[in-house]
Image: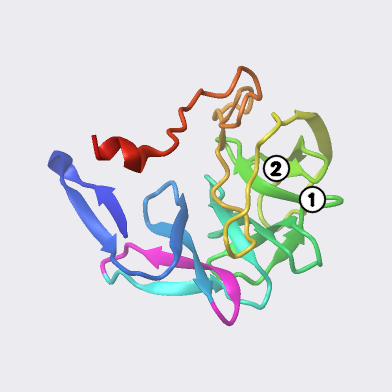
Amino acid sequence: MFQKAVAGGAEEVLMDSLEAKAPTSWSRDGRFLMYSMVDPRTNSDLWVMSFDGSRTVKPFLKTDAIESQGQFSPVESNGMRWVAYTSNESGREDVFLRTFPDSGRKEIVSTGGGHSPRWRGDGKELFYVAADRSIVVVDIGPIPARPGASRRLFTVPAGFGTRDATGSRARAPWIVTPDGQRFLFAASSGQGAPAPFTVVLNWPAALKK
């Protein structure tokens, strides 16, 4: 079930369904919500819900590949905006760009595989996690410019990045500050001893006393 907060602290139900759906991105102007939905025939697809008064729902990418983690660019250019997403259409996980709303222009961003894209606040840079677990940043120009130069920044913490039951990447637990200078990851630290636990043997006998 999707919900959003409205004026006065109340919540509005956007979608109430037993189908496997997961929201991935709001457009900055609040007009569109992108989410992934699992289809037994086409794996994980990307859909968009519009908030133009009609509350329409349309597929953005619905193919035999696994598409997930759609992220709206925070800016528009020439009446369109980029959507960054993860797909295995190349035979491995890669990060792609595709124009929205027409979805007619596609560019591959990652080199050698990648997932979990995130935008800088002005839309001029796109960050993603490469196959070697390093964070890569790519210069992104206005549509219709192609992605520019890329550079590796650092290695992500161990234990970061998981897959869901469909094989697609779950919502990645990391964010980038709007200026692209700070990064926050949710990952196991791998430090410290595990929490102790107690095993009680022959407990039925204790109940008889």
Most extreme residue toward the bottom is 41
Of the residues shown, which amino acid type is indicated by label 2?
Tyr
Percent position of residue 27, x then y: 45, 51
Q: Which residue is under mark 2? A: 128
**Magenta segment includes 62:** no
Most extreme residue toward the front is 209
Q: Which residue is under mark 1? A: 110
**Magenta segment includes 50:** yes
Instruction: In this rendered view, identify the residue nearer to me: 26 or 166.
Output: 166
- 145 relative position to 78: left or right: right
Tell me which segment is drawn in magenta: 40-53
Of the residues shown, which amino acid type is indicated by label 1?
Ser
Displayed quadrant of residue 193:
top right
Percent position of residue 135, x then y: 74, 35
At horizontal 57% and vertical 37% (from top left) the residue drawn is 122
At horizontal 78% and vertical 28% (from top left) the residue drawn is 153
Q: Secondary structure at mark 1?
A: loop
Instruction: In this rendered view, identify the residue nearer to me: 129 or 78.
Output: 129
Instruction: In this rendered view, identify the residue nearer to me: 145 or 13.
Output: 13
- 104 relative position to 171: left or right: right
